Image (cartoon, rainbow, N blue to C red):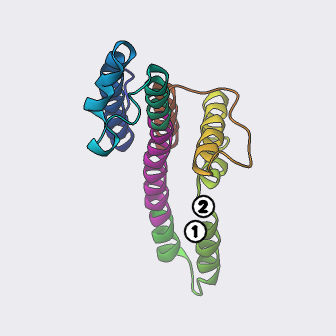
Amino acid sequence: MVTINNEDVRETYHYLLTLNVIVEKDFQHVKGNKSHLNKLVPSQLSGLYSQKQQDALKFTDGVTRTLYDASVVALVTSFERAVFAKYRTSYGTLRGVVRDSAAPPLDFFHSRERFINDSIDKLAGILSLIDGIIDDPTMEKLKQIKDHRNYIVHGKRDSIAPAIELDIDTIAKTLDNAITSISN
């Protein structure tokens, strides 16, 4: 388990770790006893995947894979929320400075506000905004995380699976490092 400083990312990470431990502990029993799966699934699915050992293992693998995919998306969502909150706070400060010190008219400010707010609303926008601010290894991992997240959320179509699959600890720590870098 890694130490995560950002509260949003840390909370999400802890939830996901807990779910992962629950799944791992319960699915260990399925490997030796396929009928144990009936205790874990909703009553409507009881008996559906536990008839054959191979089907039970395939089902548990699918659940584990889905949990990993959901974990990637949940962590990136927490990251986006934290970065957008920091961006909007700093942008609000900039807006106050411009409003208080610029001579009227402020048309430039409204144009700039519209340009910035319209363009930075996605993960790719965040990465372009922080490129050059954070160190290169963290930025490379962020790009890998973005590619993997895009692969997941777009239905695993129109792109190839990421060559490197990062574990949840690495993803959480990378996202936290990026937030820490832009906060200093």
- Residue at the far front: name it: 51
Badge 1 local density, few (<14 within 10 Å), some, or many (20+)?
few
x 48%, y 37%: residue: 66
Q: Which residue was labeled with disc 1? A: 117
Quadrant position of the N terminus in the picture: top left
Question: In the image shown, does 38 or 100 lie closer to the viewer?
Answer: 38
Question: In the image shown, does 147 or 176 lie closer to the viewer?
Answer: 147
- Residue at the far bottom: name it: 105
Q: Are marks 2 and 1 in contact (CB under 8 Å)?
A: yes
Percent of width and height locating residue 104: 57, 86
Q: Quadrant of residue 26?
A: top left
At mark 2, the secondary structure is: loop
The magenta stretch is 67-92
Q: Is residue 79 magenta?
A: yes
Q: Tell me if 44 is positioned left or right of 158 in this view.
A: left
Q: Main secondary structure of the magenta part?
A: helix
Question: In the image shown, does 157 or 175 lie closer to the viewer?
Answer: 157
Q: Quadrant of residue 135?
A: top right
Percent of width and height locating residue 77: 47, 49
Percent of width and height locating residue 136: 67, 31
x 50%, y 64%: residue: 94
Q: Is residue 162 magenta?
A: no
User: Disc 2 marks which amino acid?
Assistant: Ile
Percent of width and height locating residue 138: 60, 31
**Residue 120 numbered tag:** 2
Badge 2 local density, few (<14 within 10 Å), some, or many (20+)?
some
